[in-house]
Image (tube, grey):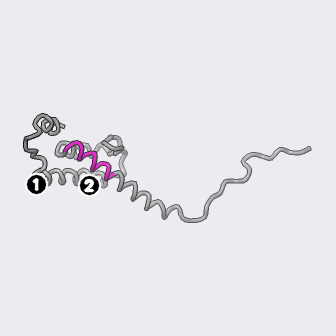
């Protein structure tokens, strides 16, 4: 966030976060955070990221490193990509479990009125 504030104050300055070394640190922090998400996927997700991303508290240090090394717009972009790929994977994996006979609702949920 401080990087973007600096960039708006000095639009003609050199943005060091686009240099190769900065990008490599950015990608390393991103990969470490998403690897932590995959490793800790069975834990309760209590922390909130951008774009609806939830993550466990064990990944908070990796998330802080990720947020500090990237521009906020890049963090949102990578979070959106991760959420999209995870929902697509869940959709594709869920298709197999839905195959089989359909369970239709019962024709009567209440007892029909008696005619006497």
Residue at disc 2, secondary structure: helix
For the stretch drawn in magenta, the main secondary structure is: helix
The total of numbered circles placed on residues is 2
* Residue occupying the far front of the picture: 12
Per the rendered image, the range of residues in magenta is 71-82
Q: What residue is rendered at 67% in x and 54% in y? A: 105
Q: Nearer the viewer, mark 2 or mark 1?
A: 1
* Left or right of residue 38: residue 11: left
Q: Position of residue 25 (x, y in %)?
A: 14, 51
Q: Position of residue 42 (x, y in %)?
A: 37, 51
Q: Is residue 41 magenta?
A: no
Q: What residue is rendered at 27% in x and 46% in y? A: 59
Residue labelled with disc 2? 35
Q: What residue is rendered at 22% in x and 51% in y? A: 30
* Left or right of residue 15: residue 83: right
Residue at disc 1, secondary structure: helix
Examine the rendered structure and indicate whether residue 50 appears above or below residue 104. above
Q: Position of residue 70 (x, y in %)?
A: 19, 45
* Left or right of residue 15: residue 36: right
Residue labelled with disc 1? 20
* Left or right of residue 111: residue 25: left
Given residues 8 and 77, the one toward you in this image is 8
Mark 1 is surrounded, within 10 Å at the Cα level, by few (under 14), some (14 to 19) or many (20 or more) other residues, namely: few
Q: What residue is rendered at 48% in x and 62% in y? A: 95
Mark found first going from the N terminus, 2 or 1: 1
Report which quarter residue 73 is drawn in: top left
């Amino acid at each position: 966030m401080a990087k973007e504030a600096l960039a708006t104050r000095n639009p003609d300055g050199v943005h060091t976060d686009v240099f190769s070394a900065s990008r490599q640190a950015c990608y390393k922090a991103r990969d470490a955070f998403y690897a932590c998400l995959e490793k800790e996927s069975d834990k309760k997700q209590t922390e909130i990221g951008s774009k609806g991303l939830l993550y466990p508290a064990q990944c908070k240090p990796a998330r802080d490193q990720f947020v500090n090394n990237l521009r906020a717009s890049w963090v949102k972009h990578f979070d959106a990509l991760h959420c999209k790929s995870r929902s697509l994977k869940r959709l594709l994996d869920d298709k197999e479990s839905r195959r089989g006979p359909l369970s239709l609702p019962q024709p009567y949920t209440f007892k029909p009125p008696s005619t006497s």
